[in-house]
């Protein structure tokens, strides 16, 4: 009996010990399970996934100038001692500016070739070396669509296009075939696809060939709307229109031409770079809602004036190098960050009295004349240069025109960060 009681007592004691929570893991000599963290070591956290680097926006500077003419004095100035032609000196002082982005200009002559001979106003034909000089100066794209496109008839159009293709200069506005005329010209720069269109209001009374009425893009509402519709359908990043229109030598813009340019913006153009008056006319930023219901920016310059010509009557002797800085976030259309311009002047003679026709930045010219004159300009041109700078800056900036020291480059517009 006593043994039975002892066994029952021992069983109860064992049960009490088990209920007291003294589990085997309480033994000091037993290692802690890997699944249980040590009191001094916090639970390990998963490695954080780094945030993706924000994609940098694409950036592009569009550089544009006005009329690229070739009067007879320029042809004679380009004649070399070997009997060839070299126009490169005309662009040396502005080569750096022209190479800062994708550069466009209006080729207001044709390359008719040596067989036809070379000529000046009223029906131009210029040595092929002029095109090579433009390429070496930094030009990427030329409009061949203006009132001088047919100066050497259809032959001149076709040969001009062959010369430009041979030296790698892109172009639009005149065409070698109907098929080409029906395609929208699209180029690429800094990853942006740019559709470029050009139209002219006139061919100086020279009729379009009956068998090739498509050879030059004439400015009509129907043609302009149709081509811009085609351009939009291609979904480029940017649409640039280079219309040739306006009244010669007027420094203001008539309402009818502003209406044309606003219509181009409405139908899809982002920038309208106009020419023909041979003098500068105002530029303007637009806020608009276009045909597709998109509210956006647009930019117009009503006339880029002469860039290189021998029209000495003021203000036909001045122009600008326009620089439009764009940025584009992924999946969005480009925006204009800044619009800048460099006032330019065509120098006719150097300080030896010799004909030396060159485009020079006005700011560089004035500073040089006050110093050691590195451009070799005439000291008696100081007054004209000073007036040229004042005229150009006042035209574009009005009351906001900076006073005091002449600047090389001016800012017309800068996008607000807000």
Image: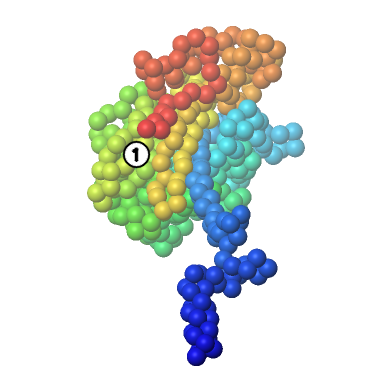
Chosen colour scheme:
rainbow
Kindly identify the residue that appears in the image at 71 percent across and 38 percent down.
83
Find the residue positioned furthest to the front: 1
Q: Is residue 191 visible?
A: no
* Residue 260, x across and y down, in percent: 28, 39
Q: Nearer the viewer, residue 3 or 65?
A: 3
Figure disc tally: 1
Going by the image, does 39 lie left or right of 212? right
Locate the C terminus by quadrant: top left
Q: Nearer the viewer, residue 149 or 198?
A: 198
Kindly identify the residue that appears in the image at 67 percent across and 37 percent down.
85
Going by the image, does 27 lie left or right of 409? right
* Residue 18, x across and y down, in percent: 51, 75
Q: Which residue is mark 1?
A: 298
Residue 373 placement: quadrant: top right
* Residue 383, x across and y down, in percent: 53, 9
Q: Nearer the viewer, residue 189 or 151?
A: 189
14 is higher (above) or lower (below) than 80:
below
* Residue 405, x across and y down, in percent: 53, 11
Q: Label 1: few (<14), some or many (≥20) within 10 Å? A: many
Q: Secondary structure at mark 1?
A: strand
Residue 381 placement: quadrant: top right
């Amino acid at each position: 009996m006593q043994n039975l009681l002892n066994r029952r007592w021992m069983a109860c004691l064992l049960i009490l010990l088990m209920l007291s929570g003294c589990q085997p893991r309480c033994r000091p000599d037993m290692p802690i399970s890997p699944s249980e963290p040590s009191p001094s070591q916090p639970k390990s956290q998963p490695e954080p996934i780094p945030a993706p680097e924000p994609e940098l926006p694409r950036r592009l500077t569009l550089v544009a100038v006005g009329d690229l003419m070739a009067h007879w004095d320029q042809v004679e100035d380009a004649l070399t001692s070997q009997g060839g032609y070299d126009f490169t000196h005309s662009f040396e002082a502005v080569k750096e500016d022209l190479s800062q982005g994708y550069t466009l200009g209006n080729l207001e002559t044709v390359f008719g070739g040596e067989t036809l001979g070379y000529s000046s106003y009223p029906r131009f034909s210029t040595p092929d070396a002029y095109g090579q000089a433009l390429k070496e100066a930094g030009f990427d794209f030329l409009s061949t669509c203006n009132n001088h496109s047919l100066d050497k008839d259809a032959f001149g159009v076709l040969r001009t296009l062959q010369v430009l293709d041979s030296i790698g200069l892109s172009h639009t506005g005149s065409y070698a075939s109907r098929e080409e005329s029906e395609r929208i010209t699209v180029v690429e720069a800094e990853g942006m696809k740019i559709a470029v269109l050009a139209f002219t209001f006139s061919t100086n009374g020279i009729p379009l060939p009956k068998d090739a009425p498509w050879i030059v893009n004439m400015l009509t509402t129907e043609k302009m709307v149709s081509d811009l519709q085609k351009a939009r359908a291609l979904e480029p990043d940017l649409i640039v229109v280079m219309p040739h229109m306006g009244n010669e030598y007027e420094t203001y813009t008539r309402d009818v031409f502003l209406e044309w340019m606003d219509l181009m913006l409405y139908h899809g153009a982002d920038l309208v770079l106009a020419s023909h008056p041979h003098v500068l006319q105002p530029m303007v930023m637009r806020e608009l809602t276009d045909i597709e219901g998109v509210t956006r920016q647009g930019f117009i310059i009503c006339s880029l004036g002469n860039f290189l010509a021998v029209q000495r009557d003021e203000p036909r002797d001045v122009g600008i190098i326009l620089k439009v800085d764009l940025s584009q976030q992924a999946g969005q259309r480009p925006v204009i960050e800044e619009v800048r311009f460099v006032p330019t002047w065509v120098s006719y003679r150097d300080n030896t009295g010799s004909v030396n026709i060159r485009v020079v930045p006005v700011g560089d010219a004035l500073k040089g004349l006050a110093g050691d004159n590195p451009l070799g300009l005439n000291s008696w041109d100081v007054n004209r240069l000073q007036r040229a700078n004042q005229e150009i800056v006042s035209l574009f900036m009005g009351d906001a025109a900076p006073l005091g020291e002449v600047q090389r480059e001016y800012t017309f517009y800068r996008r607000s960060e807000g």
